[in-house]
Image (spheres, coloured by chain):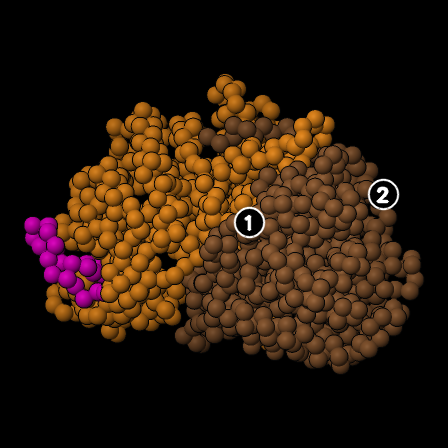
Chain colours: A brown, B orange
Amino acid sequence: MASYQAPLQFMRFLLHDVFKTEDALKSMDVMEDFNVELMDAILDEAANFSQQVLFPINQSGDAQGCTFKDGVVTTPDGFKEAYQQFINGGWSALGCSEEFGGQPVPKSLHLMVEEIFYACNTSFGLYPNLTNTAILLIDKHATTELKNSYLEKMVQGVWSGTMCLTESHAGSDLGLIKTKAIVKEEGKYSITGTKIFISAGEHDLTENIVHLVLAKLPDSPAGSRGISLFLVPKFFPETDGSIGERNNVQCGSIEHKMGINAQATCVLNFDGAEGYLIGEVNQGLKCMFTMMNCERLSVGIQGLGLADVSIQTATEYALDRKQGRVQGSTQESDAIINHSDVRRMLLSMMSSNGGCRALIAYAGNLYDVSEHHADENKRRSASQILAILTPICKAFISDNASINCNLGMQILGGHGYVKEWGMEQLVRDVRITQIYEGTNGIQSMDLLARKILSDEGTGWNHIKQDLCDMIKEAEAVNNLGKDCTRVKQAMTNLSSVTDSLLQDAKRNSNLIGAVATEYLHLFGTVTVGCLWLKMAATAINSGEDGVFQQQIKSLCSFYNRYHLATIATSVERIMVGDKVITKMDLSEFELTTMVN
Amino acid sequence: MASYQAPLQFMRFLLHDVFKTEDALKSMDVMEDFNVELMDAILDEAANFSQQVLFPINQSGDAQGCTFKDGVVTTPDGFKEAYQQFINGGWSALGCSEEFGGQPVPKSLHLMVEEIFYACNTSFGLYPNLTNTAILLIDKHATTELKNSYLEKMVQGVWSGTMCLTESHAGSDLGLIKTKAIVKEEGKYSITGTKIFISAGEHDLTENIVHLVLAKLPDSPAGSRGISLFLVPKFFPETDGSIGERNNVQCGSIEHKMGINAQATCVLNFDGAEGYLIGEVNQGLKCMFTMMNCERLSVGIQGLGLADVSIQTATEYALDRKQGRVQGSTQESDAIINHSDVRRMLLSMMSSNGGCRALIAYAGNLYDVSEHHADENKRRSASQILAILTPICKAFISDNASINCNLGMQILGGHGYVKEWGMEQLVRDVRITQIYEGTNGIQSMDLLARKILSDEGTGWNHIKQDLCDMIKEAEAVNNLGKDCTRVKQAMTNLSSVTDSLLQDAKRNSNLIGAVATEYLHLFGTVTVGCLWLKMAATAINSGEDGVFQQQIKSLCSFYNRYHLATIATSVERIMVGDKVITKMDLSEFELTTMVN
């Protein structure tokens, strides 16, 4: 069976030492109560709860899956009980406004707690996570009346939330949705249409489900500018907060999937269901992004957590499993962790995943600054950097997580391919993170076209400054010279590629599409390289030189030798010489009859 | 549902135009009957049979899986009937000696037929494939008596074969096996031990199963030099060829796996089972390699076939699915095949898989030369090149196939993650190819340590000559200049890395292990680059310029711009400057307590 202990030491190091969260909160005038002890206590509790309650029902949940009968979805054995413990522990309130009973927490802490939940049970973690981000959306965009009717119950976790975007013919392109909204009376709409792939769309964990639904009003503009957002409850709430009549929304079926089998992925039929407008008419997609941006970070974190389980299990296996002899050994056989190829795989996974965890902490930090910093300029620049980091966190981390879960499985060989050890479940569960909440191809286009090119490089200049500062700080520290040189060179590459793209690609969507995936990979790799420098510098500056600090330096060094080497390929794929990128213009290739 | 049409045009192109198989056979004095028409007829028939009989039971076979009860394994619905049709069609005789009723065929043709079977149903294809390679082993190494008792029935397909190597504590390191063989009487041995992960170890397709079992005689040398090989039948044959008494071998259970669920992966308990020595005492592993080398090619081909299904299905989906608009479009939305990022993924898959198919054809060609060429020197050099290509075919193709099946799934987005379309089954089924018959890490070590370094570069010089000839031939053709320059540069990189390794790594297994995987990737990529040049040159020299020829040129060009770019990373990971490789010495990294 898979092994997992929440990486608490690493998390504390990121929170307290690398990003100095307690200090950062002081310039924010919110969450004054937060100190190191409180953050540690929350992390400890999250680890205890997840390891004891969520992890034991992960493999059984996969085997059993959700079942669907006559419109009713039943989650696997133990999920209802675990969910009760989850809300009794107050976990559903994390990150929500105090006004509705929530407990605001630093975002980076919140994201670490999420990582622990997802590592132990991604299928489970998705149910409360969707509620949590739905709360954020409603809190930010809905009327006071709606907030008062729904938020308290949702914060308590007795009602849950969903996001209803995709339709069978409209996924990446939401402008094509056909779900209709017609005004019934002031503030009330009748919603009709079918949504697919709706996570937590129907289940037995909560007494009510609050759907956030994208739909089109009659005569609304074509495409994504004509989409409005509606709150559609499964049951109408009574004024006393109890459950009233049922609304006209029904689950038609659930999907049979590769993984996250304990998560109910539903077809939802809205048949003149009553809904309430959130935000302005035709501004639905903009409101939805409040939820979607959090979900995108969350998807990256799912990958992070699952990959960590793979790393820990593979490490344990590699320490135990004896095959073959290493040079000079006098044993009949040595633990495979001593074989270089296995060591390479483990180091690759550890340095990749540890770096991605720092990336999430960096993003969480920026989130708090962008929301709460006293200085408006700081808020703005933080939000621009976060806008760039969001698709990177989603796509770069999920791509790497998939690679890492596969490497972990590879280390176990045939034992990784059989179900017993749980390694193949990790590969199946993590695979969705590259797809949902916008495929990684869509994330790449978002990064390059929208976040880099559209604003003429303003956001890019902010993050570049940040990353260069990390390098500069590391240069002031002893013993990081070689690493600094490597990362600096990589940063120069990223800069010149970005400058070329700003110059040559701006209005050529064919070119943008052709290089976007490679560009996101390049950007993510360099950013993580800078973050490893920051971590190594922090470890050295701590004055301590224990096992943990040595490991941080080792992984920094490995990352910047091994993973940074991949940017040579990225640069070669994007650039010809120092300027043009025409070599990736793919329109010349005729594909329609390519098959036989 | 997944789509598949056997790539007959591409296969004929490789057989007849690129490798000129008919001519090649003329210098061999075997298979005189073979001509273009006969080869095409066999390919056509294989395609018809597989598409009509094997493909329709692939998805249902996955869903149902094999079942185990009281030592009996039942294959999914339709498998028995399909297997009857398979042997009635004479497919089990392909590649076997005429002496026992077989039909010798050119190896490259045989491998293409295998590709079609695997594409349609890998779980099914494994049953007869293991019989086929077991026949080769018995034919080459067993006594006349054993051959006479077993081969005819196996060639007819009414008896099947297995390879029993792995034990729970001995997979990559077979020197650790504990299964014992004790002499009972002249030529008869009593075999006791438990083997795991035995494909087709027990099933209901054939009336008898012939196990080829590695075991140790008392007082045999430690490690892999003390292993002997035994033939252990499930039922003892009567002299008239009917089935007699049952031997003491029982299936203890079957594995529950990530994929190839219709293939029975068995635990086999040998409890004093009667077995017969094959080959010399303690030379078992050497004999086993006759089977294993064929299996390693076969595993690569599994990947090839599965990836082709993924490519074809993704292409069809991309032609049909409309999302988003391309630049300048006047449609509401365009087929996603027109979006650059999707086009990039398809071109990446097609150029990778097409190149890998050429790699298999190249290996098949060398196999025939190594076995049947009149000139002994040609036989020897072909066998040295083939020895190098075998681990590359296994690991490079399976690694790429896994990437390609994942890309195909990615193109379908959420529709790829649900079971309906069959894309996720391809990802699950293909994943085992990176693991069994020696993990890809083991293949890399085999390539670098045994095939390149141990013979002081003799084999390397032969293949280098072959690859340089391909480049030279392409240089004589118009319009391939840029491609030739790229491949030539890549070949120079491979040469200088290989020379450095020959100089610096020979007796340092830590270094070999640290760079082996990267070296195999580099070698495979450059080899396929050369093969694309050979294909493009053939297409141009044909004088035709139809759609097919244009596609070959396009894919050659894409491969050599896109995939060859990955060697920049490989070279950087292996080399520091122009000589040493110490930067990949991983022994400095302490891993034991890396987790939290």
In-front residue for pair A346/B453: A346
Q: CA distance from mark 2 to mark 1?
A: 41 Å
View extreme (top): residue: B543
Can residue B503 be found in the magenta stretch?
Answer: no
Give the label on residue A456, or none.
Answer: 2
State the count of labels.
Answer: 2
- Label disc, if present, on residue B410 of the rendered structure: none
Residue stretch rendered in magenta on the structure: B228-250
Q: Is residue B216 above or below residue B4?
A: below
Q: Is residue A568 visible?
A: no
Q: Is residue A260 left or right of residue A478?
A: left
Which residue has dot 1 on it?
A267
Between B191 and B223, the residue placed more toward the observer is: B191
Q: Position of residue B575 (x, y in %)?
A: 63, 54
Q: Residue at x 18, y 66 (%)?
A: B248
Three-letter amino acid code at disc 1? Val
Question: Where in the figure is residue B327, as x and y percent of width and height?
Answer: 72, 31
Residue at coordinates 65% horizontally, 58% vertically from top-left? A236
Q: Report which quarter residue A357 is drawn in.
A: bottom right
User: Element at badge 2?
Assistant: loop
Q: Give the vertical position of A2 relative to B48 (above or below).
A: below
Residue B116, image x, y percentages: 38, 38
Q: What is the chain identity of the residue bearing mark 1?
A: A
Note whether residue B185 is visible. Answer: yes
The secondary structure that most of the magenta stretch takes on is: strand
Compare marks 2 and 1 and give the one earlier in the sequence.
1
Label 2 marks a residue whose chain is A
> A83 or A524, which is in the foreground?
A83
Q: Is residue B238 magenta?
A: yes
> Label 2 amino acid?
Glu
Task: Identify the residue shown where x is 55% and y is 25%.
Answer: B550
Image coords of residue B399 (percent x, y): 50, 50
